[in-house]
Image (cartoon, rainbow, N blue to C red):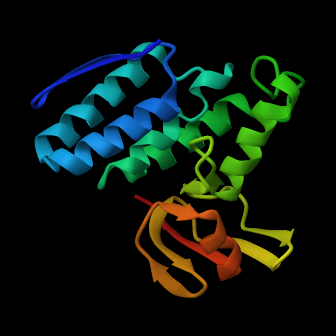
Amino acid sequence: MSTVTVTGDNITSEIYGCNMPVLINFWSSYNQEKKTTAALEQMSSELQDIAKIVRVNVNDEPDIAYPYIFNRFKGEEWRTQKTVAELLARHFTTKPDGIPGNDDAGTMSAWAVFSMMGLYPDTPGEPYYSLTAPAFEEVEIDTPQGTLKIAREGEGYIKRIKLNDKPYAKFRVGHDELIDAGTLLFELEKR
């Protein structure tokens, strides 16, 4: 259950066990209307506090979109990359217990594979992917429009993204835009 109360720029939320897509959509539309730095900074601060308190539980499906919420806030995208990399390293290993919790008919594995490819469909019903630094150097996916190639150069955090060899400044990409482009390149750098 999620409770979000908005009164001007005073924002309060109880986010434990919430529906992350609803929260993401709420904050995106709220901040598009308000366009205030204070609102963005407050939300980012609250999200960081939640991460410290509940430690994002990737053992359970409701929390798996959580790391990608930072991509909705300009300048905070690096937090998505950091959180996803930490979760993959900590919870998805080659040990016998290398998948956290119950794989829930492949849900947890799908989260890991999407995240390792550098993209994740963060909001059900929206044909968009949230982007993060990929773990794989190169992935090829056969689609009806041809082969989609996702590649990375370097290691670390995203410095630059190119879609079909053209600079791409966003951290979300539409499904059709991605498939039609044919290539998604992440140029990474250490921090």
- In this rendering, the count of numbered labels is 0
Quadrant hosting residue 153: bottom right
Identify the residue at the far bottom of this view: 165
Point 44% across, 40% down: residue: 69
| 116 relative position to 41: left or right | right
Quadrant hosting residue 173: bottom right
Q: Is residue 112 above or below residue 152?
A: above
- From the top left corner, tell me how far across and down residue 38 is, in percent: 12, 40
Q: Is residue 74 above or below residue 67?
A: below
Point 76% across, 17% down: residue: 101
- From the top left corner, tell me how far across and down residue 151 is, in percent: 68, 72
Point 51% across, 87% down: residue: 166
Q: Is residue 80 above or below residue 55?
A: below
Is residue 161 among the parts visible in the rendering? Answer: yes
- From the top left corner, tell me how far across and down residue 46 is, in percent: 28, 26
| 50 relative position to 34: left or right | right
Quadrant hosting residue 182: bottom right
- From the top left corner, tell me how far across and down residue 162 is, in percent: 53, 79
Q: Is residue 75 above or below residue 51?
A: below
Is residue 152 among the parts visible in the rendering? Answer: no
**Quadrant containing the C terminus in the rendered view:** bottom left
